Amino acid sequence: MIDYTGSRARRKTAHYLFVLLIWVICLTYFFPILYMFITSLKHETDVVPPKLFFTPTLENYRTVLLSSDIVSHIVNSAIITLSSMVLCIFLGVPTAYAIVFGKLKKPDSLFFWFLSTTLLPPVAVIIPVFLIFKNLHLLDTRWGMIIMYVGANVPIVIWMVRSFLKDIPAELLEAADIDGATRIRSFFKIVLPLARSGIISSALLVFIFVWNEFFFAINLTYVNASPIPVYMASYMTQEGLFWAKLSAISTVTVLPPLILGWISHKSIVRGLMMGAVKG
């Protein structure tokens, strides 16, 4: 006789072990954020060496949030991030459409040229970029940072949206052409609705990438256009690192992309998975 009871017990045990493994992996990835939040509630004397038992305080949040500089940095981050996201979508989606449905001689070569620009490490181009920005008077300006981030993230939008557009049957556009619709009308009435989830996923990724970017921000801005990551660096002084205050401002900084990612995680995962499968 087949031991069905033992088989069900083994499957149930395997299921519990799998769930436990998932929890361990999730907690491992989430632990740095949790530790950062706990550190932000400590006094500076409780951080190094770290104390397990301490009296929580909100003094660090009051210090960083009541600072006269934080408002301008948050405004800079919001303007730069949202403007970069909109421009990336505005430029990337039509480009992906032209690559997939346009009458180009070598669309794949053009696509891989765009994609190859993301492989260059930022540290390799910072000197020529700095000199170009200096000569064009774009240093420490919001427009300069927007141009920088748009150039860096448009290839990502093209890559993701192209994967969605390739899944749209070309017969739909041919039928629209027969009915007398122009390419522009087909683009807005057929292509955009069908690729909406990919466009949303791309926009969310651009928002997260631009909001969290630090290398170009710290090298190309000083006062007027400094985003919030640069403000975080102000708590790294010659006297030492103010770990508690740095953790507090870091917690505040990661909240927008964290909340946005949590709300729209299904769209992001669906966009990345569909892009990986369809591309």
Image (tube, rainbow, N blue to C red):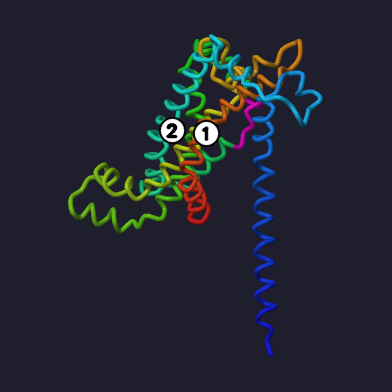
**Dot 2 or dot 1, earlier in sequence:** 2
Image coordinates for residue 189, horizontal then vertical, percent = 26, 46
**Dot in front, 2 or 1:** 1
Q: Is residue 201 left or right of residue 16?
A: left
Residue displayed at 79% across by 23% down: 48
Image check: 13 left or right of 131?
A: right
- The residue where tag 1 is placed is 257
Q: For numbered disc 2, what is the local secondary structure?
A: helix
Q: Residues within 10 Å of mark 2 (few under 14, many from 20)?
A: many
**On screen, 64 above or below 31?**
above
Residue situated furthest right in the rendering:
49
Image quarter in which the N terminus is found: bottom right
The correct choice, above or below, for 153 with respect to 66 in the image is: below
Residue, x 41% and y 55% (percent of image)?
167
Residue in the image at 75% along x and 24% along y? 47
The answer to whether the residue labelled 2 contacts the one labelled 1, judged by CB atoms less than 8 Å apart, is no
The front one of 2 and 133 is 2
Q: From where the camera sits, is residue 101 visible?
A: yes
In terms of secondary structure, where does tag 1 sit?
A: helix
Which disc is residue 88 wearing? 2
Task: Give, as a three-letter code, the residue at label 2.
Answer: Cys
Q: Nearer the viewer, residue 45 or 193?
A: 45
Would residue 91 be counted in the magenta stretch? no
* Closer-to-camera residue (37/30): 37
Residue 31 bears which disc, if any?
A: none
Report the Cα–Cα distance between label 2 and label 1: 18 Å
- Few, some or many C-alpha atoms within 10 Å of disc 1 (few <14, some 14-19, many ≥20)? some
Estimate the x, y position of residue 15 in percent, counting from the top left: 65, 64
Q: Which residues are magenta?
A: 119-125
Instruction: Tell me the kind of residue under disc 1.
Output: Pro
The quadrant where residue 238 appears: top right
